[in-house]
Image: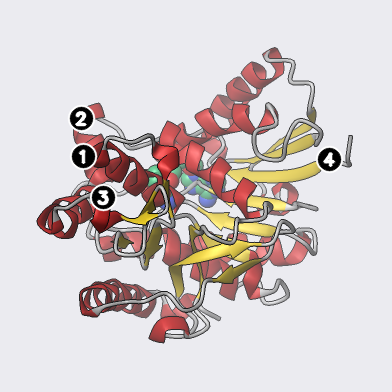
């Protein structure tokens, strides 16, 4: 057994966390030899519901769960955290535009960034899930100046998983046959799932799926609109699949990505591929097994891809404009 990993999770009484916490405590994020301490953060009105979730976690008698902290104080919740999953936020209300949602959530992430800066472990890795997750991650990062920028990310792994599953189903192969599925840009309906560089059993996707119209139109719009399609069908937003993606995101951040594959993570743009420096932008990345990532270099982007990437970059620039005052 290694020493326990402290995992702080916000929105702990919410839908995603109701699927996520049990999987973390069962060892799916850090393996069966690593004990975990769950530091569960909510807002005061949800603390009673959180007590109920904690009772259920207790009732699972998870062998790896060493301790559980329940709090509505971010400084207590992030204290010593090695991992911080920022999942809690305000939902989009009726009649709310994207800019309104960004403004409503911004201050939460400014406050949480400051709290992380003050009390998290030096090695903390932050993954923002709450929407708009790229811009929320940007705000969090700017408010935590003592934590290296490379320790922040936003989650686009659900988009990678959705894209892989669509390609596998169209090609009639198992999902494990699909690799190198990059997602570029914002976790929103402007993201660009890059099928040109994805592979099926080591071959370019467009050699296996001989249908450019489907790839360029239906595939992209299905992946971009998958969240809305799920809300329409289920009456509420993706929860179990988002929790699964969060497990994948953190587990693979601490795993060695095979040299011939990559994953999608939204991270600070260093100006790679001409993307404005400083935005939290989803790129294809490889990780080194110790919580470090590198943006994959040398990926070929044709005019079609560049046009799509510019659209999603433009949206992120507009989002950044809306929260400029929070980027201290
Ligand atoms: P829920 O509304 O079920 O849960 C959110 C929880 O956050 C609530 O319990 C609420 O009390 C809590 N909360 C609100 N403000 C908080 C604060 N300041 N500190 C701590 N907790 C706070 O939403 P859920 O379905 O769990 O979704 C959570 C977030 O994930 C949403 O912003 C949603 O848009 C986003 N998603 C992101 C995805 C991604 O791929 N990046 C996909 C799924 C999901 O749409």
Give the label, 3 or 2, closer to the camera: 3
Label pair 2/4, CB-CB below 8 angstroms: no
Q: Which mark is residue 39?
A: none
- Image quarter where the C terminus lies is bottom right
Residue at mark 4: 4
Q: Is there CB contact under 8 Å for labels 3 and 4? A: no
Q: Nearer the viewer, residue 204 or 223?
A: 204
Task: Confirm if mark 3 falls within 8 A of ligand 1.
Answer: no
Image location of residue 158, percent across then percent down: 41, 47
> Is residue 91 something one can see in this rendering?
no
Quote the CA–CA distance across marks 2 and 4.
39 Å
Q: Crowding near pointer 2: few (<14 within 10 Å), some, many (20+)?
A: few
**Where's residue 263, x and y in %?**
50, 57
Q: Nearer the viewer, residue 253 or 233?
A: 253
Q: Which residue has dot 3 on it?
A: 208
**Residue 87 shows up from this direction:** yes
């Amino acid at each position: 057994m290694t020493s326990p990993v402290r995992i702080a999770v916000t929105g702990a009484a919410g839908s995603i966390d109701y699927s996520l916490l049990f999987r973390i405590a069962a060892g799916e994020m850090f393996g069966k030899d690593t004990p975990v301490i769950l530091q569960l953060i909510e807002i005061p009105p949800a603390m009673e519901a959180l007590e109920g979730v904690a009772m259920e976690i207790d009732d699972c008698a998870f062998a790896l769960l060493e301790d559980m902290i329940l709090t509505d104080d971010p400084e207590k919740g992030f204290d010593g955290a090695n991992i911080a999953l920022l999942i809690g936020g305000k939902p989009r209300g009726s009649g709310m535009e994207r800019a309104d949602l960004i403004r409503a959530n911004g201050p939460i992430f400014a406050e949480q960034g400051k709290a992380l800066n003050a009390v998290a472990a030096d090695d903390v890795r932050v993954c923002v899930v709450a929407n708009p997750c790229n811009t929320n991650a940007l705000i969090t990062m700017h408010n935590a100046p003592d934590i290296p920028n490379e320790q922040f990310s936003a989650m686009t792994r659900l988009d990678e998983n959705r894209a892989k599953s669509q390609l596998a189903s169209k090609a009639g192969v198992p999902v494990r046959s699909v690799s190198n599925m990059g997602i570029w840009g914002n976790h929103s309906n402007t993201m660009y799932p890059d099928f040109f560089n994805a592979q099926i059993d080591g071959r370019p996707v467009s050699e296996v799926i001989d249908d450019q119209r489907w790839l360029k139109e239906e595939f992209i719009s299905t992946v971009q609109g998958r969240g809305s399609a799920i809300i329409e069908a289920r009456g509420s937003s993706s929860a179990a699949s988002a929790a699964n993606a969060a497990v994948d995101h953190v587990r693979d951040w601490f795993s060695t990505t095979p040299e011939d594959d990559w994953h999608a993570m939204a991270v600070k743009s260093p100006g790679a591929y001409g993307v404005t420096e400083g935005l939290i932008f989803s790129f294809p990345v490889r990780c080194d097994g110790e919580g470090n990532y590198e943006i994959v270099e040398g990926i070929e982007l044709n005019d079609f891809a560049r046009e799509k990437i510019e659209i999603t970059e433009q949206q992120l620039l507009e989002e950044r404009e809306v929260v400029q005052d929070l980027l201290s």
